[in-house]
């Protein structure tokens, strides 16, 4: 169990300095009408705690993780598709891509992740949530 994560929430861990990742998080926040998700940068204390707990090699997985209070961790394309599923119609239609073998989905995901800084840029520091959104973020 992760401190500060209620049982009914899922935690999205993201690369806090990546512009693409930050835009994706803003998109999720805007469309999370069921208030399912909380957020934490991989670079923060919560991110480090999960990386250590699950013995994640950050040289292989460095962009998005989805942690549930049942102590389950999803990553790469599986995490992205599970997030889309929870965002409701029409985004949940992306779950159709689960029929594609994981190694193919992850190949595309990894290609984008590998080039995300070059294509979308990088910040010097993790984004800071507004006062209204602070309750959705863990450090």
Image (spheres, helix red, strand yellow):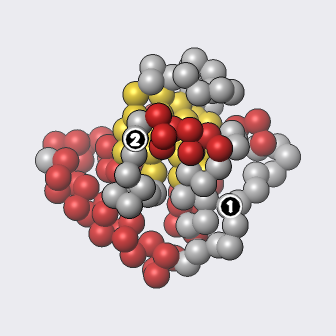
SS under mark 1: loop
**Is 130 displayed left or right of 81 in the figure?**
right
User: Dot 2, how many residues are within 10 Å of its Cα: few (below 14), some (14-19), or many (20+)?
Assistant: few
Residue displayed at 58% across by 74% down = 122
Residue labelled with disc 1? 126
Residue farthest toward the right in the current orientation of the protein:
131
Q: How far apart are marks 1 and 2 (CA)?
A: 23 Å
SS under mark 2: loop
User: Dot 1, how many residues are within 10 Å of its Cα: few (below 14), some (14-19), or many (20+)?
Assistant: some
Badges 1 and 2: C-beta atoms under 8 Å apart? no
* 110 lies above or below 3: below
Residue labelled with disc 2? 55
Q: Can residue 87 be seen in this view?
A: no
Quarter-of-image position of residue 46: top right
Residue displayed at 62% across by 31% down = 35
Query: Along the polypeptide, which appears first: circle 1 or circle 2?
Result: 2
Q: Nearer the viewer, residue 28 or 75?
A: 75
């Amino acid at each position: 169990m992760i401190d500060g994560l209620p049982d009914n929430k899922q935690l999205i861990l993201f690369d806090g300095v990546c512009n693409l990742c930050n835009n994706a998080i803003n998109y999720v926040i805007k469309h999370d009408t069921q208030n399912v998700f909380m957020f934490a940068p991989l670079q923060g204390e919560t991110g480090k705690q999960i990386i250590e707990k699950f013995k994640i090699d950050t040289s292989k997985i460095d962009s998005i993780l989805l942690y549930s209070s049942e102590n389950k961790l999803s990553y790469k394309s599986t995490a992205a598709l599970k997030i889309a599923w929870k965002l409701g119609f029409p985004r949940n239609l992306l779950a159709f891509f689960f029929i594609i073998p994981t190694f193919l989905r992850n190949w595309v995901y990894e290609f984008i992740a590998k080039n995300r800084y070059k294509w979308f840029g990088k910040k010097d520091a993790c984004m800071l949530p507004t006062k209204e959104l602070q309750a959705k973020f863990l450090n």
